[in-house]
Each structure stands twice: as structure tokens, then as C-alpha cells.
Amino acid sequence: MTSKRLASTISSSSNSQENGIPRLGLPVNTATVGLMRTSHHSALYSYSVKSGPTLGTMQKADGSVPQFVSPATSWGPNWFLFQSLSIHAMHRVGSAGNASNSSRPRKEKRLTYVLNDADDTKHCAGVNCLAVLKSPSPDYCDYLFTGSRDGTLKRWALGDHEATCSATFESHIDWVNDAILAGNTLVSCSSDTTLKTWNCLSAGTCTRTLRQHSDYVICLAAAEKNSQIVASGGLGGEVFIWDIEAALAPIVKSADHMEYEGSNGTVWSGNSPITNLRSINSSGNICANNIQSHGCHPVAAKGHKESVYALAMNDSGNILVSGGTEKVVRVWDPRTGSKNMKLRGHTDNIRALLLDSTGRYCLSGSSDSMIRLWDLGQQRCVHSYAVHTDSVWALASTPTFSHVYSGGRDLSLYLTDLSTRESVLLCMKEHPILQMALLDDGIWVATTDSSIHRWPAEGCNPQKVFQKGGSFLAGNLSFTRARACLEGSTPVPVYREPSFTIPGIPGIIRHEILNDKRHVLTKDTAGSVKLWEITNGVVVQDYGQVSFEEKKKELFEMVSIPTWFTMDTRLGSLSVHLDTPQCFSAEMYAIDLNISEASEDHKINLAQETLRGLLTHWLAKRRQRSRSQASNGDIPVGKDVSVRNLKHPRVDVDDGTENHNIVFPSFKFSTVSPPSIIIEGSHGPWRKKITDLDGTEDEKDLPWWCLDCVLNGQIPSRDNTKCSFYLHPYEGSNAPVLTRGKLSAPRILRMNKVVNYVIEKMVLDKPLEGGCSDGTFNLGPGFGQSQLPSPGDGSIRSGLKPWQKLKPSVEIFCNNQVLSPEMSLATQQKLKMCDNLRCTVPGYLFFNLQTVFYMESIEAAEDGNVVL
């Protein structure tokens, strides 16, 4: 916040009010900056600036000073302007998703990486949608496109009895909910609120990202004979009609309407939806109404007040139908975005819609288990079909619109003759059916499972299926099939097994982060339990189908490492989230990571090394581009990230600038199945495999703190990295007091180092070193080294750690239990095992060991009030 802006927000009146709350007890020369309600105190506090020697004070609304703030706290002007206002007085932060411009604290961008299975040519979560591209020539293969809850789309080249994954389309950061083909353009929508366009025959590059929806985008519809028209609907109650041809055209920029395009094809628009930018003429083609029109602004069909789950469009694209939680079918005129009619009849959410090629007849499937046939000319329901016992989620019709295939929550796939009402159960699945696509004489079925199945359907002559027997007459009341099921007259499926299956990978449904904060135990849909190492993305051990709880207990370690990441399995795989500065809170000794070339006392920051491993390919490409441009006489691409906008203090890493780009083995990610990274860039979120980064990504695409860490070797300063404690003579002993000062050591310091200190400073009566001006003594990582035998000492037994070679023997007790020398101070602090730790040296003295947080006040430690 600049001083000019600050001045504009300061009122010099002592009687001013904000939100109706008077500020009482403030001097006349005091200017109130803002109000804050703390999370720990119910009273309102006002921050103020005085012209006198006290530059900053905090007062309650009644004029009193809260107990946790000194009445005469003095802050420097720079501290007040930049620290107090940015941290305490919460200011407004405008963003695309913050339409109300509400007050909230500023949050840094997150980096997420998604760990992929060894075979990433398969889906690892449920398949939500299908689209088929029929080859115009028998010399070429047909293609099947699938969109999954793992956030990816895949293109499958179909053979006689095979399907090969020929491309993976990866850019969405959440579930892919629907996908359709508009000519040679594949259009997908996602729970990340975006639509994305792809060249369906390309290697998987996203050509454009369209942002207009305010919530999950659930469904799409396209006009078969007018490939440039696509409609989208979602949970925000919005329905948009897009001109795909115009959206793929180069961006036109104007002074009164700003658009920005990101490096991955993202389009962000600064204006709200405009309904008169495009219209459809009598021939069904979209034309521009205004010379300033922009293709990424759709026509808005306004009228839905609740979520939209289903859309359908006729071949020419002049009729659009929609349905959702309002339980009605709405019919739209895309030329104007106006409603033509509203059809009532369903008693629950509408989940699937179909239109015939002429746009006269409409089929709808609902959560009330009914399928209804509507005559739009007569504006009424002409037939109802009760064949399912639960929600109908998917519909597919024959080319002549004479028969309909339906599936849903009851795991059943039915074929129904719309004229005779005769129905037959084609097959029973193990998972709810989400979508279907007819191709020749087969039907592809997508379910909540990661596998895709093709079943015989006789789409060209569906009467062949009825000739196999087992048909029944569909009722017209929703309870008729349910009642028949209860009476034991459940139909027998015609087919027991699918004719072909594209297998998927079992998705992860459960995970547990182990105490070492490097390994994660997972369980997938097949019941297999695996152990992952998240710092390099590999499966350490596949235990098979064992008890998850028992394996978790077996792998338990008494160790405490700060939580430096969060995790979820929403995409069917492990998604690891890194947020600054919390992610830099965990450190380990290099020797514990089996890094042979590092010294015993060398500390490794887990997040820092993980980031280096993730961005090593990006850094190599960046250097390659810089060298190439330098050889051509151009200015090298990208300088190290500037520090002028950094939000947190930084500290240099321990290993020096020359080692910033070294990736230790424990942090090297696979290039065969590389992880994907998800980042909220300046132009919106994006997702790429780490090997697909081309080096052009900069601070607009990657978080500044990631660049600062990888390029400059600097990370935010961290709190609570040390523990403080006192050593006192054991009660009843005549031992002199060693020191009245406070001892401090890194939180990751192990008890064997404390043992070393006891031997060196007490048993061997070594002089104390490392005294600080504040009376504290630092137990740095190197203390106790004089007692360690040299590597050439013949008395060293192979396989023993240094702490095991110390003489005499020293043990640390807690409640009469010996603590492991490998236990860290942080572990003891976390477990809170007891109030007093006793150091015993045979033949010597007994001592109490009390630990407190390093950030606690010294007075509290001296009084013994804080004991962990």
C-alpha cells in the first residue's frame, strides 16, 4: 500500500465511525487506520497512528488496551506501513473470483504436483465422458476420446480387437466432465470452471482455454452440421453458446475491452458475458453483430436459476434444450438466447437429454428413474418409459431415433423401442453408467470405474437384440419397474461379458501420510496397498491386498517432522500441494537421506530439494534457450526473479550458489512417468508434465517463491527451527551449576548429540563455548565432534553410527524408559512424553532436561512455566 493510498484511507476525526462502531478514547491527533476482530479475542481493536513519539498503538473500541499489546508499543514507520497494514489491517485484494471485492488476506500461489503411475497411458479414475470420431475411409482407424476424473483426456486408435492410446490431452486441473467433437476440434469442460479446445488429431496441445462460467462446467452440446456452435452448462445455472471458430481466431484487442492470452492458450476476459455479440442467421451460421466482437464471449441463455446437468442441440444448431435441478426441460432459441418453452413432467433432477436431427423430438432421463419423450411442436410429453429402478444418467439413440439406450445409477443398460415400448436388459455393470457412445454395432460405456467397455448393441439393426428374448413392456409409472424388481421378475441380461475392454488403473481412494513426512501409504479401488516416496514420486513397496490399518501400524515411527505439504486423492492419484512459507519448514540431515557425498551435519530442506527435482527439466531447457539466444546475439531469456515483490523475508541456503542446481538421488523424479505440476498462473491455472516445460515459463506462470528457490537458492525465513532448554543439577546432588544460560539447538537435533554434549562439556569437563550476548549457548550441528573417532580408527566397528562409538555410555530416561539416541528434540517436543528428561552418566551426575519452544519468551523458560 503506497503512502498516497494510505493517506486517502486515514480519517483525522476522533469521532469517526466505521460499520457503526465509534472509536472512543482516541486522541485528537490520532488517525484510525482500520478495525480487526482477532481469532482469539471477541473484542474489536482499532489500529491508530499518532503524530507523537508513539507511532502505532492498538486499542479496543471502548478505548482500553488489550492485554497482549503494550499500551506504548512503538513501531518504526516502515514497519507500520508495510507490516501492520499487510498483516493486521486486512485490505482488499481484487481477483477474478472475488466479484464482491471482499476483504481477505493476500495468499501466495500454490504449486501442486500429481504423481503418475508407471503406465500413464491409462486412466486412473472414473471416466465421465466419451466421444467418437468415425473415419471417413476404411483405410483409416476410428478414434475414441475419453475424459476422466483424473483431469485428462485420451485418444484411442481403435482396431478390430485392440485400442491404443495415441495421445493424452492434459491441461485441466480438475475432473473432465464432458467432451464433444466440433469438426476437428475437441472441446472439453471441467470442474475447474473452464472449457478447453484441442486439435483432436494433434499430440495433445491445448489451443485455447475459455473462461466464462462461475462454477463447475458439467455438460456440453454441439451441432453436428454446424461445427462452430457449442453450448455449455454448469452448476452456476449458466448456459452459454460459443462460436468455436471465432474463439480459435487470433485475439482482437481494443481499448475498452481487454483480453489476455497466456502461454498455454488461456484466455481471460475482463468483461461480463455479452449476449448480443453473436447471432445465428436463417441458414444456421453464426454472424457478428458488432465489429468489436470477440470470439471468446459467448451468447448467454439466461433463465436457469439452479444447476444445469444436461444439454442437447439439433444438427443445424437452431434449437437447444437444457435441464437440471429445476426438474423442467427448457427450450432455447440460440439466435437470441431467449426461451421458447418450458416442459414440466419430471419429479426430480434431469440428468440426460437427446434431440433428434430435426429438433422436433426430445428424450430426457431423470433421477426420478423415468425416460420421457417430448414433442416440441405440441409442447407436451407423448410417452413415458419406466425401465430403470434408479436415476437415469445416460442416453444414446440410434441414428433414426427409433430406439434408445439408457443407463444410470442402477448399473443397468437397457434398449427400448420408442414406438412399441418394448425393452430389454442388455447388460449389468459393476459401476454406475455415466455416458455412452454408439459406434457401428457396438456401444462404448463409461462408468465410475477407470476402464471403458464395449458391448454388442446392434445399433444398425437393434431388432436383432429383441430376437434373443428377455424383453418386457416398459411401464409408464416410475414405480412399476421397482415393484417388478421386488416381485422377483428382474430381467435377465442378454450379454454377460463385454466384447472388448480398455483397462484402466485402479484409482487411489485412501492415503495416510507417515510420520517421516516423506512416505505415504495408499489403498486403491482394487484393495492394493502401496508405499510411496513423495520426494521422488516412486512406489517404494507394493504390499498387495493387505490390511491398510495393520500396515499403517507396522510402519509407524516415533519421529516428528513438521508438516510441509498437504495432499488429496481427488484425481485418483496423489496430488501434493506446496504452500509458502509452510512448505519450507521441514529439514533432515543428509546422512538420513543416504546422501554419501554430504557431511554428517549437512541439513536438507525437503521442499527446496523437491522443487529442484521437479523443475530440473525446466531449468535445463531455460539454459539451453539462453545459450541459443546468446549465440545469436540476442538478450538471454529470463533473469533471476526480482526480489522487489517478495512477501516474506528470505534466507540463503546452506550449500552455496554453485550447488543450487544439484539434484540429490532422493529427489530425482522419473522421466518415464513424470509427475504433472498444477499452478495458478497470472492467466489462470494450468497443468503440464514436468518434462513438457519448455523453459519459457517465467514469473507469470510459476510462483515467485519457486523461482527464487530454484534460481537464487533462497527460501523464506522460518520460525520454530530451534528448541531451547536448560540443564540443571539433579535434585539431591552436590554438582555445581554448569550454566544459568539457555541452551539452543536445531529441532532436528537428535538425543545422541545431547549425549555428546554431556560427555564433552560435563564428563570431560571441557570449557563452554558458543556463548551469545543474550546469555544463551548454541548447540550447533558440529558440537561434540572432538569425541568422534576418526574414520581411520581401527577400534571402529563397521555398521555403527558415530553416537554408538562414544565412551563412556550415556543414556537419557523418561518415566524410567530409555529414549532412543536417534530421537530428535522435535519428536520429544511433539510427543510430550513427560515433563522432565533425565540424563544419566554412570558414575557421574543426574540432570533434568526441560524443553520449550525457541520462540517463547526467556522469562517463561526461567520460571519453568512452559514445559514440553
Image: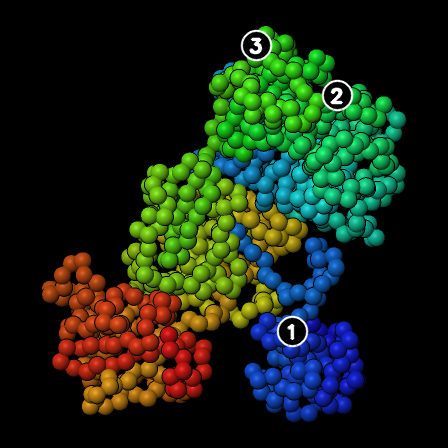
Earlier sequence position, callout 1 versus callout 3: 1
Q: Residue at x 78, y 75 (%)?
A: 20
User: Which residue is under mark 2?
Assistant: 383
The mark closer to the camera, 2 or 1, is: 2
Q: Is residue 76 visible?
A: no
* Proximity of marks 2 and 1: CB atoms separated by less than 8 Å: no
Choose between 815 and 458: the one closer to the eye. Answer: 815
- Cα separation, mark 1 vs mark 3, equals 72 Å
Determine the secondary structure under disc 2: strand
In the picture provided, is 619 more to the left or to the right than 373? left
Residue 37 is labelled as 1
Q: Residue at x 37, y 58 (%)?
A: 515
At label 2, counting other C-alpha atoms closer than 10 Å, the crowd grade (few under 14, some 14-19, many 20 or more) is: some
Residue reaching furthest front? 487
Figure check: 362 above or below 70:
above
Earlier sequence position, callout 2 versus callout 3: 2
User: Which residue is under mark 3?
Assistant: 469
Choose between 163 and 257: the one closer to the eye. Answer: 163
Figure check: 685 above or below 819:
above
In the picture provided, is 707 more to the left or to the right than 28? left
